Amino acid sequence: MKRILFRAAAAAMAAAVAVAAVSCRPAGGASAGEAPAADPQIAQTLAQVSIDSVKVYVDELVALHTRHTLSTQTDPQQGIGAAVDYLAARCGRWAQAAAPGRPKPLIERVSYSVGEQGGRYDRVTQVPELMVTLPGTEGEREILLMAHIDTRVRDVMDSTAFAPGADDDGSGLACLLEAVRLLSQVPLRQTVKCLFVSGEEQGLDGSRHLAARARAEGWPVQAVLNNDMIGNVRASGTELREDRKVRVFSESRSGEDSDSRQLARYIRETAARYVPDQEVVLNYRADRYGRGGDHSSFQREGFTAVRVCEYCEDYERTHQDVRTEDGTAYGDLPEYMDFPYLVRNIRINLAAVMSLALAPAAPAQVRIANARELDNHTVLTWDPVPGAASYQVPCRETDGAEWLPALPLGLSGQVPAGQTEFRCPLSKDNYYFAVRALSAEGHPGLPGVAR
């Protein structure tokens, strides 16, 4: 009877999420005209994100005592070696149970050498990390989800002290674990790779190793979403609590319309469609002041990458020794996390990843064809996109942060698949323009910005 009631409750939740998603429209997304309808498969997958599972992941990671990059690799109960074993075992079970007809996930243990150049290392050693590949049926492009395994206390060189790392970055690891669990049951056109990296607290070494490998091996990476601290809602010192906002940091090294900014806007748009009770705040910075994250390793190699991060940070948790001092409790423990908030942030990740994995690529060579002409029209051209059933042309005013939900003057931004030119009576001097491709099911891809 309990099992029947549980299944009924789960079905009701899935239906509720699906209804909420279908009825929601983004407030300022990257669409032109009517916003794409929510995909029932994506909504159903998001409804299956389990708060109970997420709590178990975090508790089991914390039970490893420390995951410090230089911690033991031989003890089966604690340390970085045990952490990689734990992650590989969980993902391995889901890989074996992958849905029939879906390419089986691939699990690869990775290691890299550290300490040769000094830095935050007291020895030369090999450090482990993990890569789980969820192959797409087409596999022309890859979307990377990333979080870091390692933890630390106040002394970054202390590799034996209790460093639970519940939020930093057990929350990000929980996101990746749920992604592997759920996406192993869903057929996607494009490949999703989950990168469980180490060495973040020692200087981003694990992500630097994988980013260099991705560049050397020519991985067809479309987007990188780095999840680092996505489960806390309290700001220490100010006591601000914010459980309905999450930040997406995006850097621009080539101007306002960098590819990373397009990805950030895309995450915000898909979140508004599928997770309407959580706001994505676009933060146009590489990261927080004086700090960095693993996404920057991929940006340096030329990839499109952003960081997903909680809106408030609690410095009584981050990088602290577990203790009570002057009546204040310190330490990054699970009891200080907000798990409903974490679940919503996991859903935001899955919505963006699944949408990208089902959509065509961004159009290449998007150009303003009449850029040098004295003409109040704008003429756009672009290369055809394989798999595009149609195109959309969004625009925004030059001081606007997001693409307008529709073209001004009631103009249509819809373009049929066989057409790769668009002319409209809006001045190229007053707007930024882009083009993006849609699949036959209406999944929008990333926009290619007119240069």
Image: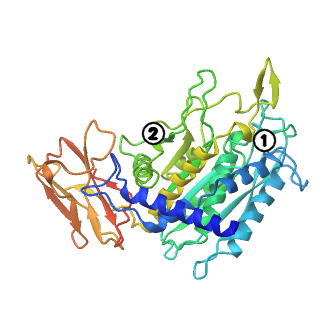
- Residue 430 % position (x, y): 18, 41
82 or 280, which lies in front?
280
Q: Residue at x 77, y 52 (%)?
A: 113
Residue 260 vertical placement versus 92 (above, below)? above
Q: Residues within 10 Å of mark 1 (few under 14, many from 20)?
A: many
Vertical relation: 230 (above or below) 25 = above
Q: Which residue is mark 2?
A: 281
Residue 311, given in percent of the width and then of the height, sits at 54, 35
Residue 164 shows which numbered tag? 1
Q: Amino acid at mark 2?
A: Val
Confirm whether residue 1 shows in the render: yes
Query: Does 354 sit above or below residue 137?
Result: above
Secondary structure beneath dot 1 equals: loop
Q: How is the image coloured?
A: rainbow
Q: Residue at x 74, y 64 (%)?
A: 90
Apparent side of residue 346 relative to residue 84 in the rendered image (left or right): left
**In front here: 446 or 2?**
2
Front-most of 368 and 265?
265
Using the rendered image of the protein, determine whether residue 143 is visible from the camera's viewpoint. no
